[in-house]
């Protein structure tokens, strides 16, 4: 069986916590949320569009990727928790 990457790999410290991760530019100002971290991500040269999977149990998933127009740019995200 093929195992897809888990979303928690984005911010492993959030395990067992209720967190909201949004772009820094969103300027979240709700008093019920406390910013606990800021994470940076670098845009890769290729973007995953999807997977093709064969059900024979012997073949690995085949990635369908496309080139990105903005590789190398750093994007910042704020991480919030409920107060």
Image (spheres, rainbow, N blue to C red):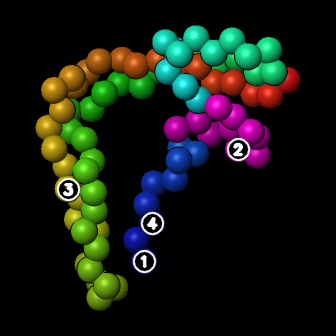
Residue displayed at 80% across by 14% down: 31
The residue singled out by tag 2 in the image is: 15
Check whether the beta carbons of the residues at disc 2 and disc 3 lie within 8 A of each other.
Answer: no
Q: Work out whether 22 lies above or below 12.
A: above
Check whether the beta carbons of the residues at disc 1 and disc 4 lie within 8 A of each other.
Answer: yes
Q: Tag 1, which secondary structure?
A: loop
The residue singled out by tag 4 in the image is: 3
Residue range in magenta is 10-20
N-term mark: 1 or 2: 1
The residue singled out by tag 1 in the image is: 1
The residue singled out by tag 3 in the image is: 64
Tell me the CA gap for discs 1 and 3: 19 Å
Is 35 left or right of 4, judged from the image as shown? Answer: right
Q: Work out whether 45 lies above or below 47.
A: above
| Total numbered labels | 4
Is 59 left or right of 27, judged from the image as shown? Answer: left
Q: Work out whether 34 lies above or below 9.
A: above
Check whether the beta carbons of the residues at disc 1 and disc 3 lie within 8 A of each other.
Answer: no
Write down the quadrant of residue 19 in the picture: top right
Is 76 left or right of 31, judged from the image as shown? Answer: left
Q: Quadrant of the C terminus?
A: top right
Tell me the CA gap for discs 3 and 4: 16 Å
N-term mark: 1 or 3: 1
Of marks 1 and 3, the one in the foreground: 3
Is 23 left or right of 47, judged from the image as shown? Answer: right
Badge 3 crowding class, 10 Å Cα cut-off, few under 14, some 14 to 19, many 20 or more, is: few
Tell me the CA gap for discs 2 and 4: 19 Å
Tell me the CA gap for discs 2 and 3: 29 Å
Check whether the beta carbons of the residues at disc 1 and disc 2 lie within 8 A of each other.
Answer: no
Q: Tag 2, which secondary structure?
A: loop
Of marks 3 and 4, the one in the foreground: 3
Q: Tag 4, which secondary structure?
A: loop
């Amino acid at each position: 069986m093929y195992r897809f990457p888990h979303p928690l790999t984005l911010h492993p410290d959030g395990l067992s916590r209720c967190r909201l991760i949004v772009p820094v530019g969103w300027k979240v100002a709700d008093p019920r949320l406390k910013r606990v971290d800021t994470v940076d991500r670098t845009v890769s040269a290729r973007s995953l569009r999807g997977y093709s999977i064969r059900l024979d149990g012997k073949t690995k998933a085949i990635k369908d990727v496309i080139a990105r127009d903005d590789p190398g740019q750093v994007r910042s995200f704020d991480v919030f928790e409920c107060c």
